[in-house]
Image: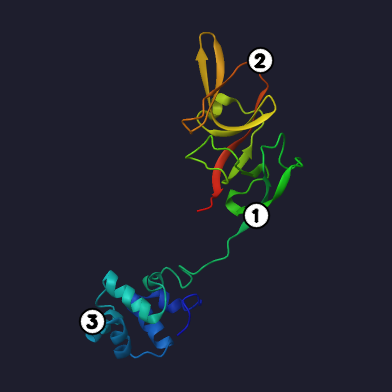
């Protein structure tokens, strides 16, 4: 029998009903209707009705027939012969940093390596960051690789509640950013999702900048 990962191209079979696809794959591997019915443990008369388009298999019968034909059930449903077949991922390498870079990722020299991300997530102003912090537990964990969009100059009130890569007096930190007004003053509050991490209140005396906004978790060890 051909392996499940084989690609079959038969447009006519996929334009028809499920019975035609069953017949196509049955004949392709040289099985008689009787032999297929026996292997799938279904009634031959029932199988004949399916192949003629007069009956539809139950989910359990479909699974048994697909197993006997050595093809994914979705192929028989008609979702193309490549459905459920491993496909190569279309990826783009982005710079991977071990700490929050103080500047554009394309100009920073501290990157440790390159990391592949799915192409639809790619942008020239994005980079990957390997977490060494536990302040965002349980949302993000040490060792996670996250995708960060470089957003210099973004106003904190425009990204309320987002997890951001920040620099506070030159020290890197990853926190959830919010803005609060207290009396006449406005403060930036940096909070970790870890309840053991106290919030940081940023005032005008501190050198604070948002270096990027976290957009996706791209890798986590299980």
Q: Is residue 155 left or right of residue 52?
A: right
Say whether disc 3 or disc 1 marks the residue closer to the N-terminus: 3
Query: Is residue 189 positioned above or below 23 on the image?
Result: above
Mark 2 is surrounded, within 10 Å at the Cα level, by few (under 14), some (14 to 19) or many (20 or more) other residues, namely few
C-alpha separation, residue under disc 2 versus residue under disc 1: 41 Å
How many numbered marks appear? 3
User: In the depicted view, which residue is nearer to us: 127 or 124?
Assistant: 127
Q: Which corner quadrant of the image does residue 216 belong to?
A: top right
Say whether disc 2 or disc 1 marks the residue closer to the N-terminus: 1
Furthest toward the front, the residue is: 196
Q: Is residue 107 left or right of residue 18?
A: right
User: In the depicted view, which residue is nearer to us: 107 or 53?
Assistant: 107
User: In the depicted view, which residue is nearer to us: 160 or 57?
Assistant: 160
- Residue 46: assigned label: 3
Query: Is residue 203 positioned above or below 212 on the image?
Result: above
Q: Which corner quadrant of the image does residue 153 belong to?
A: top right
Q: Which corner quadrant of the image does residue 62 belong to?
A: bottom left
Give the image location of residue 105, x and y in percent: 71, 41
Mark 3 is surrounded, within 10 Å at the Cα level, by few (under 14), some (14 to 19) or many (20 or more) other residues, namely some
- Residue drawn at the location 29% of the way across and 69% of the way down: 59
Element at label 2: loop
C-alpha separation, residue under disc 3 versus residue under disc 1: 50 Å
Task: Return the residue at label 1.
Answer: 92
Task: Return the residue at label 2.
Answer: 205
């Amino acid at each position: 029998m051909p392996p499940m990962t084989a690609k079959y191209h038969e447009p006519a079979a996929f334009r028809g009903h499920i019975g035609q696809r069953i017949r196509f794959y049955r004949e392709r591997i040289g099985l008689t209707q009787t032999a297929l019915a026996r292997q799938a443990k279904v009634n031959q008369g029932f199988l004949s009705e399916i192949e003629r388009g007069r009956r539809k298999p139950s989910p359990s019968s479909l699974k048994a027939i697909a197993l006997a034909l050595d093809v994914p059930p979705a192929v028989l449903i008609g979702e193309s012969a490549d459905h459920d077949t491993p496909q190569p991922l279309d990826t783009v390498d982005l710079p991977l940093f071990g700490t929050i870079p103080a500047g554009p990722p394309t100009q920073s020299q501290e990157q440790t390596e390159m990391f592949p991300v799915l192409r639809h997530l790619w942008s020239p102003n994005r980079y990957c960051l390997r977490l060494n912090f536990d302040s965002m537990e349980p949302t993000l964990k040490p060792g996670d690789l996250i995708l960060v969009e470089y957003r210099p100059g973004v106003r904190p009130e425009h990204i309320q509640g987002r997890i951001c890569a920040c620099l506070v007096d030159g020290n890197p930190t990853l926190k959830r950013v919010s803005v609060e007004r207290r009396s006449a003053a406005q403060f930036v509050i940096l909070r970790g999702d870890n309840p053991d991490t106290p919030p940081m209140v940023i005032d005008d005396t501190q050198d604070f900048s948002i270096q990027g906004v976290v957009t996706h978790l791209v890798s986590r060890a299980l």
